[in-house]
Image (cartoon, rainbow, N blue to C red):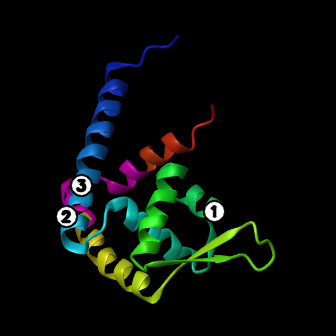
């Protein structure tokens, strides 16, 4: 069994604290300014960038939340009129999800607020640091081979 170096342990702790702090702040800003949670924004954003109707499975694979949470969020967003569900034309067992016009408008409004939050809460503090190096280091954690 390996034990991490103190610097690695410090990096891990900083990553956890930064993640919690940033996602909490960004979630609060979206709730207050756009009447949606960060997770709801993520679902709307993924449907926006897909630029096509997605199956629930495709959506769940692209969001940063669990499948059951994604299902609950989709149900809420359908209820708000921001997402439409429809049967797949080739396979009736598959449900396709797509943004409505009001969902697209809500995502656009929230997106401007969210990008502003990222610039202030991430960009400004990293101003004196090499953001590309930070991004590369974090990407290395995701690209690891087990």
Position of residue 41 relative to residue 142, above or below, is below
Position of residue 12 relative to residue 49, above or below, is above
Sooner in the amino-acid sequence: mark 2 or mark 1: 1
Considering every residue shown, the one lying at the far right of the view is 90
Residue 19: quarter of image: top left
Judging by the rendered image, the residue that carries numbered circle 1 is 58
Disc 2 to disc 3, C-alpha distance: 10 Å
- Of the numbered discs in the image, which one, if any, rests on residue 126? 3
Disc 2 to disc 1, C-alpha distance: 31 Å
Q: Is residue 129 visible?
A: no
Q: Marks 2 and 1: CB-CB under 8 Å?
A: no
In this image, 137 relative to 19: left or right? right
Q: Residues within 10 Å of mark 3 (few under 14, many from 20)?
A: some
Q: Residues within 10 Å of mark 1 (few under 14, many from 20)?
A: some
Position of residue 37 relative to residue 34, above or below, is above
In this image, 34 relative to 94: left or right? left
- Which is nearer the eye, 121 or 124? 121
- Which region of the structure is painted magenta? 118-135
- Which is nearer the eye, 62 or 34? 34
């Amino acid at each position: 069994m390996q034990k991490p170096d103190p610097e690695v342990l410090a990096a891990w702790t900083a990553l956890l604290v930064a993640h919690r702090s940033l996602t909490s702040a960004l979630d609060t800003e979206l709730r207050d300014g756009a009447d949606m949670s960060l997770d709801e924004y993520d679902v709307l954003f993924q449907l926006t960038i897909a630029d096509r109707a997605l199956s629930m499975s495709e959506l769940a694979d692209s969001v940063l939340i669990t499948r059951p949470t994604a299902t609950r969020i989709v149900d809420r967003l359908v209820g708000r009129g921001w997402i439409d569900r429809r049967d797949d034309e080739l396979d009736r067992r598959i449900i396709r999800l797509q943004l409505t016009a009001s969902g697209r408008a809500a995502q656009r409004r929230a997106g401007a607020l969210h990008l502003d939050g990222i610039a202030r809460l991430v960009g400004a503090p990293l101003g004196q640091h090499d953001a590309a190096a930070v991004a590369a280091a974090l990407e290395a954690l995701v690209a690891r081979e087990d």
